[in-house]
Image (tube, rainbow, N blue to C red):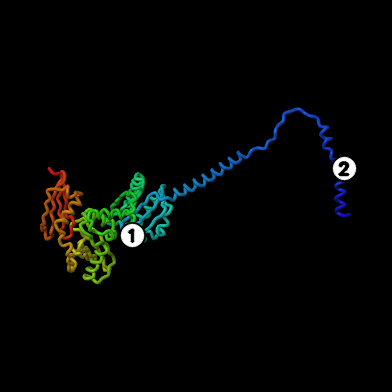
Amino acid sequence: MTNEKMEQRLAAALEKTAPDDVNGVLSRCEERKGTVIPMTTKKTANRKWTSLIAACLAVMLLGGGGVFYQRANAVASVVSLDVNPSIELKVNRSEKVLSCTPLNEDAKAILADMSNGADLKGAKLDVAVNAIVGSLVRNGYLDSISSAIMISVEDKNTARAEKLQRELTSTVDGVLQTSEAKAAVLTQTLTQDAGREQQARENNISTGKAALVNHVLALNSALKFDELAKLSVEELKDLAEAGAPAMPIGTDKAMDLAAAAFGKVSAAKMAYSAVDPELDESPAHYEVEIKSQSGEEFEYKLDAYTGAILESKREVEGGAETPAVQPSRPEPPAAVQDIGYAKAKSIALNHAGVSENEAYDMDIELDDEDGILVYEVEFKSGNMEYDYEINAATGAILKHESELDD
């Protein structure tokens, strides 16, 4: 049997089983009463709105997550810690550290055991500052009573900056007290300044230290920013308190001069050395300590502006002190042998914060006091009377007084 014949037989069988009798079926159906329920097709508008709302919610959630992420990683404050090492910390609004950057070689040594600062990322700010100050103490930067550490907070929000400043001062004070370090703590809050940021980048210092350098430059515009940037915070602080009369030789130069003198008095090699700037004393000087491998200790006092060795002594076993062999003093540069009346007046006025137009009854005299030429500057401003003694060779303020003019 072929396929065609098989299909024909199946068709005939289906016709007999289900005859085409539609009219007959309908005539036998009775009409019934009842409620007619129309079966209309439901519109899909609601489904569209539901889908749209769900999509919007998803976008909002994703966008919100992005906002939260951006806030968590946005820099809210820039905190800098300066001694001579300069370290910059960027933090978010939750006071979490986003980055910790050493700005000079000394700072890299301080952060060496913290993966150059990478280990502090994500830490709370006070924890990070505690670790950094602890390392500064261990490395001997905060031993001297005259040493100083400066905390600077840069933030658009003044209230937040002041709050951070108070918190960090308390944190640093706590570390210093625990370690019995004797350093002074300086603090300042800053607003953002593009010019200052550029100065900081060009000289590899923090914006906080750049602000301190600019403060010194305001006292003496003849000084150079790049040279001042190399000084420590302690030197800059003392220099500002002295009225910034001239550019000091710096700790490195002071050490070189003392080492040269040490070589003349002893062939022993140095086992220990330290330099302590005293730019706010009279006369301004650097104190250099050198210890030989044989146990002898040498101390040198050098003029802060000329490098001349003012005093030297040697301490031998048993604590006895004897004058060390004094090398010939280098002659001061001609440029600082006599600063002149005008410069002496300018130094006194700048230190007092008085403009030349506000000063009256000005009197300037050059006097010899124990072999040192001194300018005595007296003037009045408002209801105050000022009296200054200024080293004629270096411009250092040796003495200053102010009182109400009766």
Residue beneath disc 2 = 16
Dot 1 amino acid type: Glu
Q: Residue at x 39, y 55 (%)?
A: 100
Viewer-side residue, 233 vs 345: 345
Comparing 197 with 41, the one in front is 41
Which residue occupies the extreme front position in the image?
Answer: 23
Front residue of 404 and 296:
404
Pinpoint residue 21: horizontal percent, then vertical percent. Answer: 84, 38
- In the image, farthest residue toward the top: 33
Locate residue 101 relative to residue 315 in the image: left or right: right
Amino acid on which disc 2 is placed:
Lys
Q: Is residue 374 visible?
A: yes
- Residue 406: image quadrant is top left
> Mark 1 or mark 2, which is nearer the start of the sequence?
2
Q: Secondary structure at mark 1?
A: helix
Q: What is the secondary structure assignment of the residue under circle 2?
A: helix
Specify the quadrant that holds the N terminus.
bottom right
> Is residue 278 shown to the viewer in this render?
no
- The residue furthest bottom is 267
- Seen at 13% across and 44% down, the residue is 405
Foreground tag (2 vs 1): 2
Q: Position of residue 273 (x, y in %)?
A: 27, 64
For the residues labelled 2 and 1, the Cα–Cα distance comes to 104 Å
Q: Nearer the viewer, residue 243 or 312?
A: 243
Q: Is residue 255 left or right of residue 357?
A: right
- Return the residue at label 1: 202
Q: State the image coordinates of residue 158 (x, y, percent, origin top left).
A: 34, 45
Residue 64 % position (x, y): 49, 45
Which residue is rendered at x = 21% and y = 54% of the image? 243
Determine which quarter of the picture holds residue 311: bottom left
